[in-house]
């Protein structure tokens, strides 16, 4: 039996998330609403003699995309020889393409059977794309549904978060982003829906380190026929966050807090309190987690040559 590391990318819009759900009553049913379930199904074309059990390096939620994530899987061939990794990549991509699935295997490689794609990862990089309307012409204070009246390039639907705000201060959030750098108890920035027990509130589970948080000008991904109007209508921005690991919805909550600050719904003191008084009760209700559509897992980092 040989272990393979699959470097994958996907558009998460149509998936419930990357992780499959196992129905105990229907264990033979493949969860094709998840990225993992679709990969499991595609791997069946190789007819390995062992049961296919893919392992994920990172979990992403419904609507979140990945430019690079990793999965490892053990496959045993009837003749005991390893599969050719180029063939493995090509056959998987052809199978996924036939099913019209927005998943792509970037590359695959044989790794030692002691390698674990999640435990051996030394870091992850996330990107959040958002665009702010340059001249929101809505002065009546009622912004609900106004976003539907503004131009949005069709190529960017579900790929970027478009923000309509009467005012937006990008320099303010660039300064505030520094507060998140370093080690903090991010309990306030963790969604409670996946807590399995009260013990998950203990700092040993909620302490995380943010290595870098950068906010830079971005660009539209619209095709030339729409790109000029998109660039004239919006200022595009990229928020890049690097760390070893993240709590459930931590990145989207951090971005949501920064966007609320830039839109003047909260001030710096609110962010400081959410960071220094870690509790689900410290979450400011004026802050909404940033929509999933703008979030991309950019990179899973490893120390050695597995970081392709």
Image: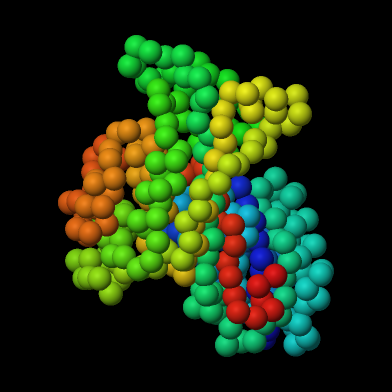
Displayed quadrant of residue 66: bottom right
Is residue 288 shown left or right of residue 110? left
Work out whether residue 188 or residue 198 is closer to the camera in this orientation and state it: 188
Residue drawn at x 70%, y 61% is 105
**From what the image shows, is residue 247 above or below residue 16?**
below
Residue 173 seen anywhere in this rendered image of the structure? yes
Residue 295 position, x and y percent, is 51, 48
Residue 88 position, x and y percent, is 77, 69
Work out whether residue 210 or residue 9 is closer to the camera in this orientation and state it: 210
Displayed quadrant of residue 262: top left
- Identify the colour scheme used: rainbow
Residue 106 position, x and y percent, is 72, 61
Is residue 8 shown left or right of residue 57? right
Residue 78 position, x and y percent, is 75, 83
- Please count the marks in the image: 0
Residue 160 seen anywhere in this rendered image of the structure? no
The C terminus - image quarter: bottom right
The N terminus - image quarter: bottom right
**From what the image shows, is residue 13 above or below residue 72?**
above
Work out whether residue 197 or residue 240 is closer to the camera in this orientation and state it: 240
Work out whether residue 44 or residue 221 is closer to the camera in this orientation and state it: 221
Displayed quadrant of residue 47: bottom right
Residue drawn at x 52%, y 70% is 123
**From what the image shows, is residue 165 above or below residue 90?**
above
Residue drawn at x 31%, y 65% is 184
Is residue 200 shown left or right of residue 229? left
Residue drawn at x 58%, y 83% is 115
């Amino acid at each position: 039996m040989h272990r393979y590391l699959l470097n994958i990318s996907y558009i998460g819009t149509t998936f419930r998330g990357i992780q499959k759900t196992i129905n105990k009553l229907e264990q033979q049913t493949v969860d094709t609403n998840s990225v993992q379930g679709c990969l499991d199904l595609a791997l069946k074309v190789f007819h390995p003699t062992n049961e296919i059990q893919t392992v994920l390096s990172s979990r992403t939620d419904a609507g979140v995309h990945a430019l690079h994530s990793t999965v490892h899987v053990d496959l045993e061939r009837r003749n005991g020889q390893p599969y050719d990794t180029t063939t493995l990549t090509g056959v998987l991509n052809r199978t996924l393409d036939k099913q019209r699935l927005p998943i792509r295997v970037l590359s695959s490689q044989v790794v030692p059977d002691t390698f674990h794609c999640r435990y051996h990862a030394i870091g992850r990089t996330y990107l959040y794309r958002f665009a702010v309307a340059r001249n929101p012409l809505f002065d009546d204070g009622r912004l609900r549904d106004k976003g539907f009246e503004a131009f949005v390039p069709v190529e960017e639907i579900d790929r970027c978060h478009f923000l309509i705000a009467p005012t937006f201060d990008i320099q303010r959030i660039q300064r505030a982003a520094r507060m998140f750098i370093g080690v903090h108890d991010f309990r306030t920035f963790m969604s409670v829906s996946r807590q399995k027990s009260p013990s998950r509130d203990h700092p040993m589970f909620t302490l995380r380190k943010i290595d870098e948080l950068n906010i830079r000008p971005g660009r539209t991904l619209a095709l030339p026929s729409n790109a000029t109007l998109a660039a004239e209508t919006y200022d595009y921005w990229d928020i890049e966050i690097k760390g070893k690991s993240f709590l459930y919805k931590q990145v989207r909550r951090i971005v949501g807090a920064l966007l609320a600050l830039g839109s003047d719904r909260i001030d710096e003191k609110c962010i400081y309190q959410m960071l220094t008084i870690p509790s689900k009760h410290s979450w400011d209700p004026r802050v909404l987690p940033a929509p999933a559509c703008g979030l991309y897992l950019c990179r899973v980092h490893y120390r050695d040559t597995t970081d392709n």
